[in-house]
Image: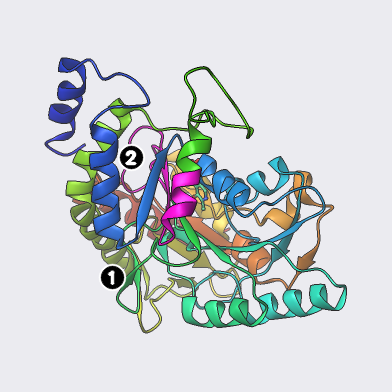
Amino acid sequence: MGENEFKYVQEAFDTNWIAPAGPSIPLFEKSLKDYFHVGAVAAVHSGTAALHLALVNLDVKAGDYVICQSITFAASANPIVYQGATPVFVDSETDTWNISPESLKEALEDLSQKDIKPKAVIVVHLYGMPAKMAELESICAEYDVPIIEDAAEAAGSNYLGKKCGGFGRMSVISFNGNKIITTSGGGALMSNDWHLIEHARFLSTQAKDNAPHYQHSHIGYNYRMSNVSASIGRGQMEVLDERVRKRRSNFDFYHTNLDQLPGISFLDEPYGHYSNRWLTTIMVDPAKTNGITREHIRIALEASNIESRPLWKPLHLQPVFREFPYYGGKVSETLFQNGLCLPSGSNLTDSNLKRVVQVIKETLSSKL
Ligand SMILES: *Cc1c(COP(=O)(O)O)cnc(C)c1O
């Protein structure tokens, strides 16, 4: 937490606004609107809820198809299944790890041959690295399919100078506890079309029609953010840029100390891509490390009480999504096989970072 979160929460208690209504919610939404340069924002319970509302807004229902990047957190795709629709997974490209424009085109072309027009394409900025929005936008425009931007991991990233979270027909941000800023749990749906956001707000508060009694002509959801969470969010927005600087300096430290080691590589920023470096990730190539794998490094870190994790397991390989269509090759699968997320918190000290580097170097110089 920064300096002012507690002050704003105290205000919520002092004024007794402990509800999914209250003065912090529009103030938080205004700060998001200004930061991400979007027309309108609805603050909700979670990023997952925001994605769900995005799909409801596009009238995604049983029999529909929605395209989604395969290597991502399951929450990117779960709401497609909540709606009874079919997710179609697409492989990544090697230079951003995000949805491959080539494989996306292949998927759209093949679906169009089968007379299927997907309702949306969900684009993710994995670990904060912006996807190639210009290419993706032009492909999606060609097939007339709207983009939903899953910017859950990318608050503070930008692409060609434009903030991630400001692309697509609608975009989604998460304030879950593991993200770069947090409201303990929370999310937001953003768009330049304020009608969509107005409707999402209506749906997120149980879809109550304008009447003195409880009158409903839509199925609603209880997804609205609480005034207490929004109070935390107001404080967090004041420190977002500082958090991005810290995360990027974590990346720089690891990069400076590990990049020259044979078999270890980092994801560079392609021209025009500015990553918040939410998590620092490395790729381990066992052909160049005398057989030391990602898993050897992970286990050695664990033995030193340091938590690290493999990259997201591609969704087309997950038991629960296995039956759904997939387009592409083995890029995301290889990322999962060889990739590792290093400790990346905003509160890591220099000595924490040095310890991580030391264990990785020792592991790489050990004999199998
Ligand atoms: C965290 C995350 C979500 C879901 O956000 P929650 O606020 O945890 O529901 C969705 N997509 C991606 C890529 C995420 O990392």
Q: Is residue 144 left or right of residue 155?
A: right
Quarter of the image for residue 327 reads bottom right
In three-dimensional space, the C-alpha distance between marks 1 and 2, rounded to whole angstroms, equals: 29 Å
The image position of residue 129, as x and y in percent, is 42, 67
Disc 2 residue type?
Answer: Thr
Q: Are marks 1 and 2 in contact (CB under 8 Å)?
A: no
Question: Which residue sits furthest front?
Answer: 212
The image position of residue 260, as x and y in percent, is 37, 76
Tell me the residue at 64%/75% (across/down).
144
Q: Which mark is residue 182?
A: 2
Disc 1 residue type?
Answer: Thr
Q: Which mark is residue 231?
A: none
Above or below for 13 versus 107: above
Tell me the residue at 54%/19% (across/down).
214
Tell me the residue at 76%/68% (across/down).
117
Q: Is residue 153 visible?
A: no
Q: Which mark is residue 256?
A: 1
Above or below for 181 versus 158: above
Q: Is residue 126 left or right of residue 323?
A: left
Tell me the residue at 40%/81% (across/down).
270
Q: Is residue 364 left or right of residue 78?
A: left
Q: Is residue 122 left or right of residue 356?
A: right
Above or below for 180 versus 49: below
Q: Nearer the viewer, residue 324 or 226?
A: 226
Indicate whether residue 178 is drawn in magenta: yes
Stretch of the chain drawn in magenta:
173-199
Q: Nearer the viewer, residue 314 or 48?
A: 48
The image position of residue 132, as x and y in percent, is 49, 77
Helix, strand, or loop for circle 2?
loop
Q: Nearer the viewer, residue 127 or 221?
A: 221
- The answer to whether the residue bearing label 2 lies less than 8 angstroms from the nearest atom of ligand 1 is no
Circle 2 Cα neighbour tier, 10 Å, few/some/many (<14 / 14–19 / ≥20): many
